[in-house]
Image: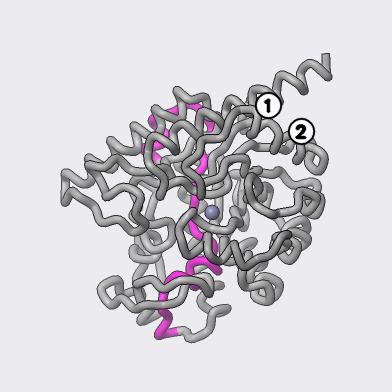
Amino acid sequence: MTDAFLPTAPVGSLPKPSWLAEPETLWSPWKLEGEELAEGKQDALRSAVHEQHRRGIDVVSDGEQTRQHFVTTFIERLTGVDFERRETVRIRDRYDASVPTVVGAVSREKPVFVEDAKFLRAQTDQPIKWALPGPMTMIDTLSDRHYRSREKLAWEFATILNEEARELEAAGVDIIQFDEPAFNVFFDDVQDWGVATLERAAEGLRAETAVHICYGYGITANTAWKATLGSEWRQYEASFPLLQRSTLDIVSLECHHSRVPMDLIELIRGKKVMLGAIDVASHAVETPEEVADTLRAALEFVDADKLLPSTNCGMAPLPRGVALEKLSALKAGADIVRAELAAVRS
Ligand SMILES: [Zn+2]
């Protein structure tokens, strides 16, 4: 995938330029329309790639510059979903949001992100990663007036995601990542059909496949939820043993400044680990040494050739300058540990 040792691979989203969308806001409306919007999205994507290049990031993403939201933008492009009929639902059992409604059988009549992925592919020779929402997180981010079964709808979405993923792979995407923050909330569903539908979404792909499970963006509802989780966050204990036995190649998890006990990483031994060494809920930029400390601690539970230094989650809601500085910190921290490991080997 990449020749780099400890390849840095941020989770995904980066803040958009303020001329494109209101900063520090989820579901921020676009400030442009029509042709201007299409061109603006591409310029923002170019800029996101440029910043990742210049800050030494190894696995490059689109920064999710062409989508309004990591889940709803995908859902809105499907048939069977009425995005003008919006309903307020409780997301992740935590906060209310206005989301589109499933009103008939869902299908993907045309590719959603494939043209954007081709555009990203043309901007860089480095490995590229593309994020898609996972089936469980999709159903948790809409209102369903048709299937009225979370599991049934999850299998439908898994089939659709697999179609999209195969075309992303053909467009040159090296890693396809499924975002499943819902795995940290609905443990019975994870066990019953969550991992199975995720495997269906990833079926038959030659590209590497990743699942990102986190404690959410650094928004108030998530911060308040985290405060109720006690001194040790053991949510990963439910999904990791299942994922260790799954066909997924990479597990992306939140770690830095969270109360996740580091030894839970042992539960996914053998998988590649995208380790969150950057806190996305704080505006304080980590020092390289702080990043290195987190990586060193994780190396007790993951082999060095399977560790990908990463961020806890997407950075869309952060001030743009802070997010970019955090990319630099991630690279600088990885460099410290790379040098230490190289010294031990020689
Ligand atoms: Zn996340």
Q: Is residue 158 visible?
A: no
Q: Residue 306: x percent and y percent?
A: 73, 38
Q: Quarter of the image for the N terminus: give it.
A: top right
User: Does residue 327 lie above or below 35 as drawn?
Assistant: above
Query: Residue at horizontal 39%, vertical 63%?
Result: 72
Q: Which residues are magenta?
A: 118-146
Cα distance, mark 1 to mark 2? 8 Å
Q: Is residue 161 left or right of residue 211?
A: left
Around disc 1, counting alpha carbons within 10 Å, would you say few (fewer than 14), some (14 to 19), or many (20 or more)? some
- Quarter-wise, where is residue 245 in the image? bottom right
Between 198 and 206, which is closer to the camera in this rendering?
Answer: 198
Q: Quarter of the image for the C terminus: give it.
A: top right
Q: Which SS class for mark 1? A: loop
Q: Is residue 305 left or right of residue 326?
A: right
| Label 1 CB less than 8 angstroms from ligand 1 | no
Around disc 2, counting alpha carbons within 10 Å, would you say few (fewer than 14), some (14 to 19), or many (20 or more)? some
Amino acid identity at mark 2: Ala
Query: Residue at horizontal 34%, vertical 72%?
Result: 98
Q: Which SS class for mark 2? A: helix
Residue labelled with disc 2: 304
Q: Is residue 73 visible?
A: yes
Q: Is residue 290 left or right of residue 47?
A: right
Which mark identifies residue 74?
none
First in sequence, mark 1 or 2: give its number. 1
Amino acid identity at mark 1: Phe
User: Does residue 279 lie above or below 178 as drawn?
Assistant: above
Between 87 and 220, which is closer to the camera in this rendering?
Answer: 220
Query: Residue at horizontal 43%, vertical 61%?
Result: 71
Q: Is residue 11 magenta?
A: no
Residue labelled with disc 1: 5
- Quarter-wise, where is residue 302 in the image? top right
